[in-house]
Image (cartoon, rainbow, N blue to C red):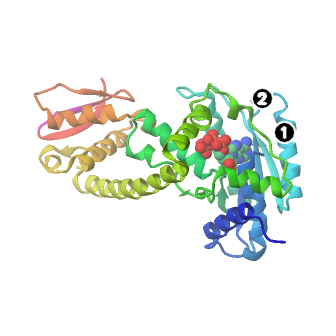
Amino acid sequence: MRLHPSVAAVRVAVRRDLEDLDPGAVVVVACSGGADSLALLAATVHEARAGGWKVVGATVDHGLQDGSDAQAERVVAQMAALGADETLTARVQVGADAGIGPEAAARRARYAVLEQVADHVGAAAVLLGHTRDDQAETVLLGLARGSGGRSLAGMRRRFDRYRRPLLDVSRDDTVTACQVEGIEVWDDPHNLDPGFARVRVRRSVLPVLEDQLGPGIAATLARTADQLRADTDLLDDLAEATYADLVTAEGALPVEALEGVPDALRRRVLRLVAVAAGAPPAELFHEHVLALDSLLTRWRGQKWVDLPGHLRGVRRDGLLEVTRAT
Ligand SMILES: Nc1ncnc2c1ncn2[C@@H]1O[C@H](COP(=O)(O)OP(=O)(O)OP(=O)(O)O)[C@@H](O)[C@H]1O
């Protein structure tokens, strides 16, 4: 029987993404029980036969919904039935972390426990099931927030040990792959809750864009993210090099040297100075960087500018520096 195109699409994506792994490598698949990560697990098990990898299926129980432990057990049984060499479930405590919402707190707890799992099993790679549609949603959300090139560049294909092999695969394909392989998927009730901006983008905004601008908009957005990511990576690397070049032993930057640096680079360098001084990256917004930049571009003897983390940007004696607010 011919392989179904959706199953083939998921398998090819996994094969391409993991081809650098050696035989014997341990691959963790982070599995929520949704269509994306179950299709990912099934394809990884299949490809692991040729690659000689060991597949560990891991599911995290956030304990946020009634019956989440039973749901985690169901996912474990499914992963085993799909042929994972090892399966495990990890329960996390999602506390009310300061300054972040419950979704972000759950995500943070999930990555922390996945990190422990990966260490424990000696994983060469941890796979996440984000698809091209997730990427398109991320780009649109970034656009709506106005948060600049980095967030428009979407999710990375890889970071640390993590990989997202399905970023070029559509959600239609993961759902269809599960259907044709007889894999029962769990629909997270959060994915239907219009209280989440991501759900509104998925269910209302993207369909309108598809309808009005033509099909393939998700692919176009994902491609745009790829291009932007290459650009922003280059700029980030250049900024790191410029910062390393200019920074004094005390962590300050000479104003004169900064003035000759082009805007896109200079603002990144200023961000690095603030982060190096202890500004929390998640709270350091573009407006803060622009405020710091105004000490160069609109210099009229300002005393200081306020920055998150109880910090101040100051200009004195030909130097720009970020110091603790007194
Ligand atoms: N409970 C879970 N257990 C294990 N892995 C999970 C769990 N939830 C999500 N994942 C992994 O994360 C991927 C993305 O899931 P989802 O889109 O629900 O998360 P998210 O909160 O948007 O995460 P991210 O911060 O990674 O974007 C899934 O395909 C899966 O690989």
x 22%, y 37%: residue = 293
Q: Are marks 2 and 1 in contact (CB under 8 Å)?
A: yes
Secondary structure character of the magenta stretch overall? strand
**What is the span of residues highlighted in magenta in the rendered image?**
313-317
Q: Which residue is mark 2?
A: 65
Residue 55 in percent (x, y) is at 77, 63
The residue closer to the viewer here, 83 or 198, is 198
x 24%, y 38%: residue = 321
Q: Is residue 3 above or below residue 148?
A: below
Res. 305 image quadrant: top left
Is residue 12 on the magenta stretch?
no
The residue closer to the viewer here, 4 or 242, is 4
Is residue 316 on the magenta stretch?
yes
Q: Which secondary structure lies at badge 2? A: loop
The residue closer to the viewer here, 115 or 2, is 2
Q: Which residue is mark 1?
A: 71
Q: Is residue 6 at all visible to an observer of this figure?
A: yes
- Which quarter shows the N terminus? bottom right
Residue 89 placement, left or right of 134: right
Residue 319 in percent (x, y) is at 16, 41
Residue 295 in percent (x, y) is at 18, 34
x 46%, y 56%: residue = 226
Tally of marks: 2
Q: Which mark is residue 82?
A: none
Residue 86 in percent (x, y) is at 83, 59
Residue 274 placement, left or right of 218: left
Q: Which secondary structure lies at badge 1? A: helix
Residue 122 placement, left or right of 251: right
Q: Quadrant of ligand 1?
A: top right
Instruction: Check disc 1 and give the amino acid type.
Output: Gln
Crowding at label 2, few (<14), some or many (≥20) Cα neighbours within 10 Å? few
Instruction: Check disc 2 and give the amino acid type.
Output: Gln
